[in-house]
Image (cartoon, rainbow, N blue to C red):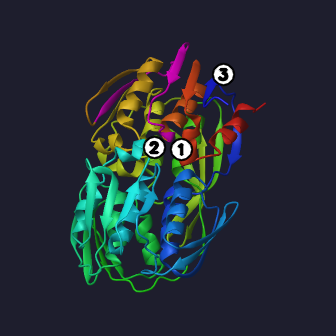
Amino acid sequence: MPNKIILKKKIPNFSKKILIPGDKSISIRWVLIASLATGVSRAKNLLMSEDVLASIRAIKKLGVKVVINKNNCKIYGAGVRGYKYKKNLIINAQNSGTLGRLISGILIDTSYPIKIIGDRSLSKRDFKRIAKPLSKFGASFKLNNNGLPLLINGAQKLKPIEYFEKKGSAQCKSSVMFGAIKASGKTVIKAKKSRNHTELLFKYLKLPIHIKKNKNFDLIEIKKVNKIKPINYNVPSDISSGAFFIALTVLSKKSNLIIKNVNINPTRIGIIKILKRMGVKISVQNRKIYKGETNADILVKSPKNLKSINCPSNLNSEAIDEFLIIFLIAAKAKGISIFKNLDELNKKESPRLKWGSKILKMMGIKVITTKNSIKIFGNPRLRVNKKIIIQKYLKDHRVFMTSVVAALTFGGEWHIHDKDSIKTSFPSFLKIIDIFKNEK
């Protein structure tokens, strides 16, 4: 079968209620923490995407027993220092920056050198940003042009460190947090605001962590951990995956949508805040706290008009995975939308700022970009009437899904290559899309 899809028809109006797969960030973190626990941890609705499956294969290589039954998973934890290290061990993180960076923190006490590799896209991403602070614990790292492959040489006596995370990267922060639980003494992390799933899991498990929140930074103190109790988890739906269906609704006429049981962690709801400023009727209901996380149903209605936005940079970290789809919505807004300080967007699976600009230009939208900003000259009446080919985008799953939403809402004939890219985060994306395409 060809690894591309061709879309020629806009979707009709719809009224839908959907449930989407488990949150990727939480799924990967649960796998890693469960592997370090003493005893059996169980998860329901675990996301069975390539990134999560790569995480499971990684811990199995380290001697951890895993049993999977559909979307349910049991992990027989090895303990904080119970991994079985073998000579010449290679961990393949595939496309997952979360796995590659977080497990590097866990492996700083490895008895033998361990090599971490990844696919073409991940290998281009910056791993010096985690190797530099992790080496302060006492481990040593050898990189390939600041990327993968990465060779870790562990140390048995690990000292605590002080680390200033300035970029708002949850992966860098979490990598150091995992390293800190193995180091003697107290590690202190000053971190720019970013998603806090790791902190919430640590707090729920009553690990020795103390967090002081300031306006722009969090001060996180972590002490050595000797034992982690097992954790059973019912993984909520992923707002980053839900964002594509939110956009599908916003860009369609006379449509509404409910997405059930979505994780609305305050560090992840930038898209909701941004769309509200743009005039979208979006709200949450049935809000509940589950093991430190906030989950709820998301309700969205297609607006009659969309307003442009000068997006506050303090929302960037909350919406970093959703900006491609936000740019697409801005293309239909009246006026000029401005997004600034988006350096981190080009350090994802593909240079997403460039790809966001490229897709909009193909559609006929005027765009002005710099290395870290974009101006989008919206056109509420835009309709695409030409052939558009999307390919050679480093198989970035979010580029693929954004292109699908564009094709189904703006029209035109779209040839979108590398459909297997969705296996990274959202394998059932096209099946759920079919539900909307078949509305009568």
Badge 3 vs badge 1, beta-carbon distance below 8 Å: no
Q: Residue 423, position in %: x, y?
A: 58, 45
The reply, left or right, for residue 249 in relation to residue 394 is right
- The structure residue drawn at horizontal position 26% and vertical position 30%, both measured from the top left corner, is 370
Residue under label 1, please give it: 243
Residue under label 3, please give it: 9
Q: Earlier in the sequence, mark 1 or mark 2?
A: 1
Given the image, on which type of amino acid does mark 1 rest? Answer: Ala
In the displayed orientation, state which residue is furthest to the right: 440
Is 395 in front, or is 308? 395
Q: Earlier in the sequence, mark 2 or mark 3?
A: 3
Q: Residue 121, position in %: x, y?
A: 41, 42
Given the image, on which type of amino acid does mark 2 rest? Answer: Glu
Residue under label 2, please give it: 322
Tell me if residue 385 is in the magenta stretch. yes
Q: Earlier in the sequence, mark 3 or mark 1?
A: 3
- The structure residue drawn at horizontal position 62% and vertical position 46%, both measured from the top left corner, is 427
Count neighbours of disc 3 (C-alpha within 10 A) and say few if under 14, some if 14 to 19, many if 20 or more. some
Badge 1 vs badge 2, beta-carbon distance below 8 Å: yes
Q: Which residues are magenta?
A: 373-397
Is residue 62 visible from the viewing direction of this image? Answer: yes
